[in-house]
Amino acid sequence: MSAYSIGVDLGGTNLRAAAIDDRGKMIEKISGSTHIKEGRDAVVNDMVQAIDSLRKRIPGDLAGVGIGVPGFILIEKGVIVGSNNLAPLENYPIRDEIEKRLGTKVILENDANAAALGEKWIGAGKDVNDLVLLTLGTGVGGGIVSDGRVLEGSVGMAGEIGHITVVPNGNPCGCGNTGCLEKHASATAIGAMARLIGLGADLTALDVYNLAVKDDRRAKAIFTSMGQHLGIALATLINIFNFPLYLLSGGPLPAWDFFAPAMIAEVEKRSFTYRNAPTRIEKATLGNEAGLYGAAYLPLLHRH
Amino acid sequence: MSAYSIGVDLGGTNLRAAAIDDRGKMIEKISGSTHIKEGRDAVVNDMVQAIDSLRKRIPGDLAGVGIGVPGFILIEKGVIVGSNNLAPLENYPIRDEIEKRLGTKVILENDANAAALGEKWIGAGKDVNDLVLLTLGTGVGGGIVSDGRVLEGSVGMAGEIGHITVVPNGNPCGCGNTGCLEKHASATAIGAMARLIGLGADLTALDVYNLAVKDDRRAKAIFTSMGQHLGIALATLINIFNFPLYLLSGGPLPAWDFFAPAMIAEVEKRSFTYRNAPTRIEKATLGNEAGLYGAAYLPLLHRH
């Protein structure tokens, strides 16, 4: 009987869990809500219940459970130390608690790191061993896969690409910096720019995209700006890593044709390596599922 | 009889070779000049002769030869593809030629990568497995050691930290970019800033340092600017890698007390990870020898 693993994606809004076999085939998925307002124990109970119900129904050996969470984590301790969306879970031994209740191996990981690993396993990066993923959403998440594994750093905080400086005196960020990539290129930043230039006070990234499709000059300028800032960050990443593949995912991806030309122009200008070594910048292919696949892959990887 | 290895540091001006044993003890060193004006063959002959004369005098098994060169290299092919100082050696099978003439294993590496590895082996980084080294000189070189080995990237161009953008519309760089770190924080940049603000037309970084020691306000402002730009780059590196150690080396190091306060202030502002995970920013300790040690370590590492 083949082995399988369970991946969990614990977001601020949604809680999802999926059983995935060791060849990357999804066997079953459960989707629910994250009841963060009901407190820490409610969230942990929901997770344990979801994992347990999958385990009871799936035949085969459970290799373990991987959990992707938004925020800064300490990977050795299995603890969330900073998370805008999951603040009640900060500094709580969430990994050990779930491990104890289930009696199986649990690995905690940052959600963007998990998504990068998912894309490497069975997504747009399955033909390479080294890639960087940027997830464009409320913020900008980053995950780095080096030699087939997540680059964790000394405590598990590697890959915080959303907080690299792209405009030294740019927009202020909650992290304490000014000009973080995520304040100039996230879905949230698109909405903020729309407001700034008087396009509308409460437009979403999708609204701005729809205006761009209708050839609205200002909406298109917003995506050009977003592309330029993504390009600065990507050129930095390419100069640092010389990896073969850089992936983008997230809500603004449909606007690719509006932001990518400015992004690529910036990368070409700013990276000798991009111009001289084979380097692809592409759309990720697993969408929202990447984090589930990557989380499930973690215990399979660590088994070897 | 213990094994030893030969490290070569091929600079635009100096050619040095050293025999180093497998515990990192330097046995013998040869220092000469790089006769680049006499052409490619003269340089290759000098290298082969230096290596061979060491080999003839040293007892024990030669594990191989490592050669550090300034510039962009293709590591698998053993070829230099871009080098301001060694242009006549570009696109020539230098590694294979030397290997053939000596009949021993030769590894070509970027000089800053070699220096980073040297610092990891027996220098300031010997107690860690992951570090980044910045070498401040004519330009700014970078070397990344991850899990005890040089991060090479897909063709060997990883670690080009001197060319990451720290000022999007900053000083133009020969690489095609504007605002590269090395145009705002190298020894050359210090001299250029001195000229720009009327401190002197032909001052070296050392001259500017001597003025700063005499409490010259403008000389001190130059080091503050240099520190700020180093800080932007270091914060980016820390956010990306979450490594425990970042090292600086090179001519401007004596000016540490003038540039480091601004550098650290910038890092503290721009990196949540720096503020929350144990992270050291320190002086490298091997100076000019780092590249020799690292080059010699390459064949020892690849033996395992």
Image (cartoon, coloured by chain):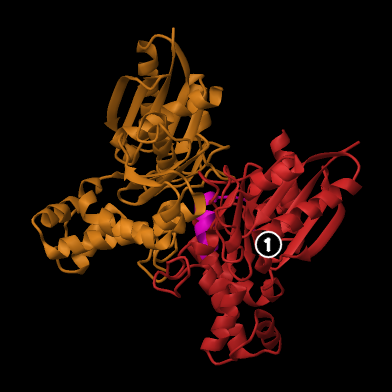
Chain colours: A red, B orange
Residue type, mark 1 in image: Glu
At 16% from the left edge and 61% from the top edge, which residue is drawn?
B219
Most foreground residue, A194 or A40: A40
User: Magenta span covers which residues?
Assistant: A233-248
At 53% from the left edge and 51% from the top edge, which residue is drawn?
A157
Q: Which quarter shows the C terminus of chain A?
A: top right
Left or right of A66: which side holds B23?
A: left
Q: Is residue B231 above or below residue A211?
A: above
Q: Is residue A221 above or below residue B165?
A: below
Q: Is residue B277 above or below residue B17?
A: below
Q: Is residue B18 above or below residue B198?
A: above
Q: State yes or no: residue A239 in magenta.
A: yes
Identify the image quadrant of residue A30: bottom right
Residue B160: horizontal and vertical position, in percent? Answer: 45, 50
Q: Which quarter shows the N terminus of chain A?
A: top right
At 58% from the left edge and 50% from the top edge, which residue is drawn?
A79
Residue B32: horizontal and vertical position, in percent? Answer: 28, 30
